[in-house]
């Protein structure tokens, strides 16, 4: 049975998997502060559920579009700080979750949504899904994984291209670059994730947790850079780039960053 957790999150036990669904398809499952807290609460529920793994996916046609742009477009300094550092708290909750977390990428992952995939232990993408680290095009920067952990996965030059040009990458390209483990047809996504969970359920839960925590070495080494990047983004908020980028995206026009900064 699916249980609505509130604030745009649903949970469900399917066999050995604890499914957490981002349930705001009207905004491409972008998360605001209440939704972010609900996702962390859902992870906590999963840790106590007796499941072998947690699966994170999105409702509707999208996986996740990162932070909610409507909030960014009208945010104050304290709200921006809460949004950025709240995202770090969410990603660290995934990294420190005692169960393996599998991203079932059912559709586009954009901006912070790509970094959300990167925070998960494993990722399976539907072949129609696509990925775009478009942060610099909305006056932000992908400092929560895009500049560190994902760069380790795909290589520095590929990472710089993805984060500086902000282009769109197919699921097949994402797998070739090391962003995801497997790509399957849309209708096979749940079954493929289920097959991974079956294998995870054969392992010692304690050994999996130890392996996961040990494998966090690169994430932990990158944390200082993440915090420094977040502080820089918060300080740069007064430039107007973030407001302009968010507003331009909402209005479906090209941003005028140099004009906004003058």
Image (cartoon, helix red, strand yellow):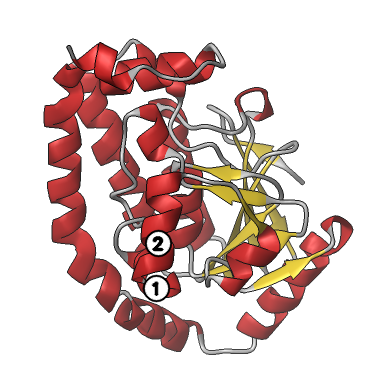
Tell me the element at label 1.
loop
Give whichever of 28, 17 is nearer the camera.
28
Vertical placement of 121 versus 108: above or below? below
In this view, the residue in front, 174 or 36, is: 174
* Label placed on residue 155: 1
Q: In the rendered view of the protein, which quadrant contains the C terminus?
A: top left
Q: Which mark is residue 180?
A: none
Circle 2 SS class: helix
Residue highlighted by disc 2: 159
* Badge 2 density bin: few <14, some 14–19, many ≥20, Cα 10 Å: many
Whether residues under marks 2 and 1 lie with C-beta atoms below 8 angstroms apart, the answer is yes
198 left or right, relative to 225: right
Disc 2 to disc 1, C-alpha distance: 6 Å
- The percent coordinates of residue 18 (x first, y second) are 62, 59
At horizontal 62% and vertical 29% (from top left) the residue drawn is 24
Q: Residue at x 58, y 46 (%)?
A: 109
Q: Quadrant of residue 34?
A: top left
């Amino acid at each position: 049975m699916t249980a609505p957790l509130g604030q745009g999150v649903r949970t469900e036990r399917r066999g050995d998997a604890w499914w957490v669904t981002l349930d705001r398809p009207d905004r491409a499952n972008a998360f605001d502060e209440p939704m972010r807290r609900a996702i962390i609460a859902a992870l906590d529920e999963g840790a106590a559920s007796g499941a072998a793994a947690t699966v994170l996916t999105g409702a509707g046609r999208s996986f996740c579009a990162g932070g909610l742009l409507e909030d960014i477009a009208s945010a104050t300094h304290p709200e921006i700080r809460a949004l950025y550092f709240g995202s770090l708290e969410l990603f660290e909750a995934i990294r420190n979750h005692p169960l393996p977390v599998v991203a079932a990428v059912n559709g586009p992952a954009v901006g912070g949504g790509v970094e959300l995939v990167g925070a998960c232990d494993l990722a399976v993408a539907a072949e129609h899904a696509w990925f775009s680290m478009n942060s610099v095009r909305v006056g932000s920067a992908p400092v929560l994984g895009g500049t560190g952990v994902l760069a380790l996965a795909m290589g520095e030059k590929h990472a710089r291209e993805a984060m500086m040009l902000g282009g769109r990458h197919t699921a097949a390209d994402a797998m070739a670059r090391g962003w995801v483990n497997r790509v399957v047809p849309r209708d096979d996504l749940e079954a493929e994730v289920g097959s991974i969970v079956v294998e995870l359920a054969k392992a010692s839960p304690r050994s999996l947790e130890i392996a996961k925590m040990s494998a966090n070495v690169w994430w932990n080494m990158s944390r200082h850079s993440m915090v420094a990047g977040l502080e820089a983004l918060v300080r740069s908020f007064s430039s107007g780039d973030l407001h302009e980028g968010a507003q331009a995206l909402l209005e479906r026009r090209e941003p005028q960053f140099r004009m906004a900064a003058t």
